[in-house]
Image (tube, grey):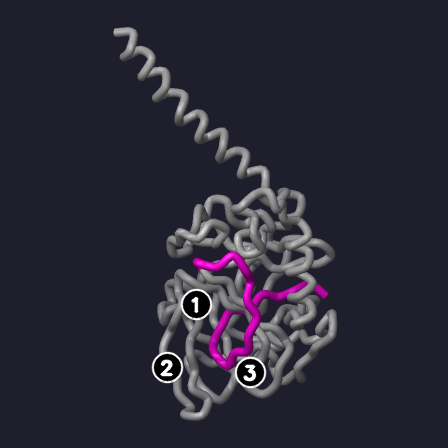
Amino acid sequence: MKKQFVYLIACMLVPLFLVSCDKDKGKESVPEENITRDAVMDADSNMYDVVKIGNQVWMTENLRTTKYEDGTPIPLDTVGVPSRYCPNGNAANVKKYGYLYNFRAVMNGAHGSETNPSGVQGICPQGWHVPSDAEWQELESYVLSQLDPGKQYQTIAKGLASAEGWMTSDNVGAPGNDPSSNNYMGFFALPAGKLLISIDEDRLLYYDGFGSAAYFWSATGSDNAAMMRYLDSNSQDISRDTSSDGISVRCLKD
């Protein structure tokens, strides 16, 4: 009887201990005062929350507008002109993941920029702009400066990645590993994936990375291609590359 009583007490204490550990991880969550709800509206009257990270203010959601600020519509599923695409080819994903856009749609006729701030409103609402490569670098530097090297689950990828939607990973510090400890910067990056586009053949190819990768445009580029950033469910880092595909947009406050 005594052994059964001890076992019962142990079973009761273990869940409490696990909850306590989770609460410790929760201390890394973004302070509520850094988040502003429904702070900006796009041309379709969609409302977006924003977050202050260092000296920058970012939208916490991917853009999902179907038109520019002047009311000009952005075509769906086209090549060679400004266009938008549904994540993974499914319109039901747009509300949560936003649209994917080609670079022409993102820039709306503006020239590429390497400055900080970029000065490119492009597809963004009034008072907001498409971040340059230099502005992405500023974000990365700030997030890295805030990490506690003594905590394995604190990485730049987990700091920016949302706590949901990521494919499972065994790599500690990757967004897909213990996603409940993600997003302590409040950026809420979701793995919307991308649409591969063949510019030479003037055709859409296939969707890739939905659930495993988040891609974001910068304003630093020309013609159909530009620098972008991406997070992967199995990586601790944020990566930098060029793209000519259909990917997500995050706007930055002027």
Q: Is residue 62 above or below residue 205?
A: above
Give the residue displayed 44% in from the left and 53% down from the top: 171
Q: Residues within 10 Å of mark 1 (few under 14, many from 20)?
A: many
Give the residue displayed 70% in from the left and 67% down from the top: 127
Give the residue displayed 62% in from the left and 81% down from the top: 221
Q: Is residue 57 above or below residue 72?
A: above
User: Looking at the image, is mark 2 or mark 3 earlier in the sequence?
Assistant: 2
Query: What numbered label is drawn on residue 86?
Result: none
Q: Residue furthest front?
A: 150
What residue does disc 1 label?
193
Q: Is residue 44 visible to the viewer in this orientation of the structure?
A: no
Give coordinates of residue 27: x percent, y percent: 58, 38
Give the residue displayed 49% in from the left and 32% down from the top: 21
Give coordinates of residue 23: x percent, y percent: 52, 33
Give coordinates of residue 58: x percent, y percent: 64, 59
Dominant secondary structure, magenta: loop
Q: CA distance from mark 3 to mark 1?
A: 17 Å
User: Looking at the image, is mark 3 or mark 1 earlier in the sequence?
Assistant: 1
Q: Is residue 9 visible to the viewer in this orientation of the structure?
A: yes
What residue does disc 3 label?
225
Q: Residues within 10 Å of mark 2 (few under 14, many from 20)?
A: few
What residue does disc 2 label?
205
Q: Is residue 247 left or right of residue 147?
A: left
Residue type, mark 1 in image: Gly
Magenta residues? 233-254
Q: CA distance from mark 1 to mark 2?
A: 14 Å
Q: Is residue 90 magenta?
A: no
Q: In front: 181, or 155?
A: 155
Q: Quadrant of the C terminus?
A: bottom right
Residue type, mark 2 in image: Leu
